Image: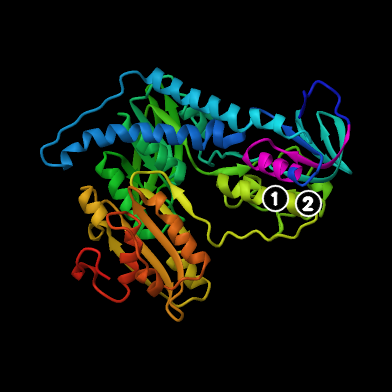
Amino acid sequence: MTVIPSSNRVRGVYDLAVIGAGSAGFSAAITAAEQGARVALIGHGTIGGTCVNVGCVPSKTMIRAAETLYQANAASRFSGIAGQAKITDWDKLIAAKNNLVTDLRQKKYIDLLPEYESITYIQGWAKLCEGGVMVDGDFLQSSKTIIATGSSSMVPPIVGIDDVAHLDSTMALELDALPKSLLIIGGGVIGCELGQMFARCGVKVTICCRNRLLPSMEKEISAGLQSVLEEEGISVYVGLDYQEIEQNQTGITLIGKSNSRQHQIRAEKLLLATGRRANTESMALEENGVEVLENGGIKIDEYMRSTNPDIYAAGDVTGTDMFVYMAAYGAKLAARNAMGKAEVYDNSAMAQIVFTDPQIAMVGLGELAARQQGYEVKTSIIGLDNVPRALAARDTRGLIKLVVDSKTDILLGAHIMAPEGADSIQTAALAIKHGMTSAELGATIFPYLTTVEGLKLAAQGFGKDVDKLSCCAG
């Protein structure tokens, strides 16, 4: 592995240039190198990209830390037990999070590069040009190019927003001290995850959103999560029309309206969590025949190929399936296809996870999406009070919903809201991938006192009242 800093002139001929050194970029570069290709991996900014540095890794360790506070304080749900926990040193907690990030970045990115002699890592700003890419103004020749430059936080169009100091998710995880109150604009994954985390750390949190919480999830789950958050003391405003936002000496004030009622929402700090936009600026895409979608993502076909047949794209920069595992998967396909394969991207059994507590997980189609695709559907919904694992854990917050084709009985989608839902959804993903029916899922043997057993119970709910089953029945 050779490292060429941006201050040096870039020379050489490569089989593949990969722009972006995050999860997708590394996946593409390693995949191509394993096929014998000479690869230029071009990074700008901190190596490793969003996930390890400012996204998945730091947020999930902080979410888990805050969960220990909640679990200790909720110990009284078991008779005869009382517990209490508190943050004793915020600086130490942040330092531990930063150490984890540093260690994983070193182990999973920096230390990997020397293992691949055919990868040249180049630091610099890249843009497309005929026959390859330009890196800080110098030409690099490559037969094929993969763009994997990720995405960045969006700022919503609210009157006054440009004059208001705000945090994005990255800055929120780097705060030197906890604010007394936090206003979060955006009820998607980031807003809900970080909102609950900060609330559990003692911050007075308010979440506002134009639609409902987690609008891509089932309505039953959105409503269930809202109830959980409100029970934990979080104020939630859904269906809010943002009218104006301003800042003064005491903090932030958002003025909005919902159901013809005016609201003035105040907080010390503001966190914007209104989505992400693909990083495609200043890359000369259009000049090189690369079409961009309305959401800013690069338009690709099922082979990860852009409208320029020599240029591919993967990960958040495509504007779809913004999950690190899908970025790595898509980048692998892009690399293989750039090297002559013709493998098709398939997200039909793609699981999605929200690391709130309870966790939320889904795979396949929701009820509305299935109907829009022309299916006649039937659904089964059970509360966690029907799942023995939840009863034993004294925690029945949540539900399980299955969506099934009523004509064929084939499972189309599964939706879980449960404390251990993230570790249960892959069973449903395999069921969907292999075309299982709800009858087959309901007849499958599941281990007793597990959350995943709830999938079996929900499947049995299509034909019987699971309230009337004994333990392990069926």
- Does dot 2 land on a helix, a strand or a loop? helix
Q: Quadrant of residue 231?
A: top left
Position of residue 110 relative to residue 469, above or below, is above
> Residue 233, located in which quarter of the rendered image?
top left
Q: Is residue 349 magenta?
A: no
The location of residue 342, given as percent across then percent down, is 75, 60
Task: Classify 60 as above or below 436.
Answer: above
Colour approach in the figure: rainbow
Q: Residue at x 46, y 26 (%)?
A: 97
- The quarter of the picture where residue 302 lies is bottom right
Neighbor class of circle 2 (other Cα within 10 Å; few <14, some 14-19, many 20+) is many
Q: Which residue is mark 1?
A: 298
- Mark 2, residue position: 338
Q: Give the residue type that dot 2 points to.
A: Ala
Is residue 376 toward the left or the right of residue 104 in the image? left
Instruction: Using the numbered discs, state the Cα–Cα distance from disc 2 to disc 1 in whole angstroms.
Output: 16 Å
Is 36 positioned to the left or the right of 105 in the image?
Answer: right
Specify start and end residues of the magenta stretch as a single range. 12-33
The residue lying toward the viewer, choosing from 184 and 249, is: 184
Q: Magenta stretch: residue 23 in it?
A: yes
Q: Inspect this view and state whether residue 389 appears.
A: yes
Q: For mark 1, give the secondary structure.
A: loop
Q: Determine the residue positioned at 48% across, 70% down.
A: 370
